[in-house]
Image: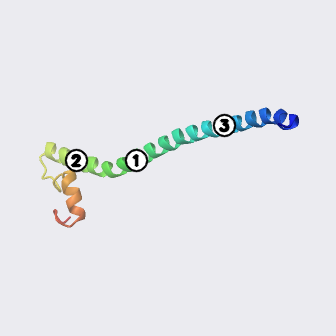
């Protein structure tokens, strides 16, 4: 084997190993950041959907405590899905 070639093989192998290690670290960090971002997006979407339901339930509870007739009845999650298919109460 050529001595010059063997002398360059070790630095090339070291540089390649370093680049692979850097790439692996970047992938792991990006994965963790992406997972956190996806989790926060899911939480925000669930909050956006559940907030009106909670506000309506609070209004119904306050109306019931005040002795006033309640507005619309509280709808279960099953009914929400059915409502999207137009098989639940039509409000």
Q: Quadrant of the N terminus?
A: top right
Give the residue displayed 11% in from the left and 46% down from the top.
Answer: 67
Left or right position of 62 against 30: left
As measured in the structure, the alpha-carbon distance from the residue carrying label 2 to the one carrying label 3 is: 52 Å
Which callout, 1 or 3, points to the residue nearer the camera?
3
Lower position in the chain sequence, tag 1 or tag 3: 3
Left or right position of 26 against 73: right
Lower position in the chain sequence, tag 2 or tag 3: 3
Residue in front for this viewpoint, 88 or 72: 88
As measured in the structure, the alpha-carbon distance from the residue carrying label 1 to the one carrying label 3 is: 30 Å
As measured in the structure, the alpha-carbon distance from the residue carrying label 1 to the one carrying label 2 is: 23 Å
Residue in front for this viewpoint, 58 or 28: 28
Q: How busy is the neighbourhood of tag 3: few (under 14 within 10 Å), some, or many (20 plus)?
A: few
Left or right position of 25 against 2: left
Give the residue displayed 74% in from the left and 33% down from the top.
Answer: 14
Q: Residue furthest right?
A: 4
Q: Is residue 40 above or below residue 78?
A: above
Q: Quadrant of the C terminus?
A: bottom left
Residue 2 is drawn in which quadrant?
top right
SS class, disc 1: helix
Lower position in the chain sequence, tag 1 or tag 2: 1
**Residue beneath label 1, please?**
42
Residue 7 is drawn in which quadrant?
top right
Q: Verify CB contact (< 8 Å) between mark 2 and mark 3.
A: no
Which numbered tag is attached to residue 22? 3
Q: Verify CB contact (< 8 Å) between mark 1 and mark 3.
A: no
Give the residue displayed 79% in from the left and 36% down from the top.
Answer: 9
Which numbered tag is attached to residue 57? 2
Which callout, 1 or 2, points to the residue nearer the camera?
1
Q: How busy is the neighbourhood of tag 1: few (under 14 within 10 Å), some, or many (20 plus)?
A: few
Q: Position of residue 12 (x, y in %)?
A: 77, 37
């Amino acid at each position: 084997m050529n001595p010059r070639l063997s002398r360059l093989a070790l630095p090339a192998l070291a540089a390649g190993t370093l680049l692979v290690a850097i790439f692996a670290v970047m992938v792991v960090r990006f994965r963790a950041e992406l997972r956190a971002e996806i989790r926060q997006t899911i939480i925000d979407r669930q909050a956006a959907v559940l907030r009106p339901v909670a506000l309506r339930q609070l209004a119904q509870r306050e109306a019931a405590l005040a002795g006033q007739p309640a507005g619309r009845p509280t709808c279960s999650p099953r009914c929400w899905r059915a409502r999207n298919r137009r098989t639940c109460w039509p409000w």
